[in-house]
Image: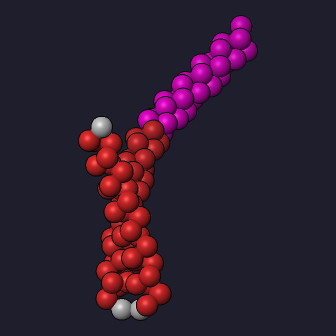
Amino acid sequence: MKAIEAKIKDLEQLINHIISDHLVVQKENVQLKEKIVELEAQLHSQSDEVQNLGIQLERLRLARGLAGDPEEAKAAKAKLGSLMREIDRCIALLNE
């Protein structure tokens, strides 16, 4: 009888330990999910920043092209021509 009681007591301790570990893992899981959300927001913010910096870089290249090096000037003029043709197409579509 004592052996059975001892085994039951050991089993209860094991179950309590498993429940405790489970609660710890659940808490860690919640923290990790929150960290994922935080990192996704940070990634989105940085992606926006990279896109904005790319636009700024393109504008700087265009400005330099108009101001200096003949090769960059050709590229800038080509880009401006392309943009003007696109604007003309948009205006034509609006007039239809």
Task: State the extent of the magenta-drawn residues as a range.
Answer: 1-30
Left or right, residue 55 beside residue 71: left
Residue 5 location in percent, x, y? 66, 12
User: Is residue 5 shown in magenta?
Assistant: yes
Q: Quadrant of the C terminus?
A: top left
Position of residue 29 measured from the top left corner of the image (x, y, whole percent): 49, 36
Q: Locate residue 41, reporting x and y percent.
A: 37, 48
Q: Residue at x 45, y 44 (%)?
A: 36
Q: Is residue 96 in the magenta section?
A: no
Residue at 71% x, 11% y is: 4
Q: On screen, 54 above or below 75?
A: above
Main SS of residues in magenta: helix
* Residue ID at (41%, 64%): 82
Is 31 above or below relative to 15?
below
Q: Tell me: residue 81, above or below residue 17.
A: below
Task: Pick the residue in front: 92 or 41.
Answer: 92
In the rendered image, the quadrant that contains the N terminus is: top right
Of all residues shown, which one is farthest toward the top?
1
Q: Is residue 55 visible?
A: yes
Residue 53 visible in rendering:
no
Side of 10 where 57 appears, left or right:
left
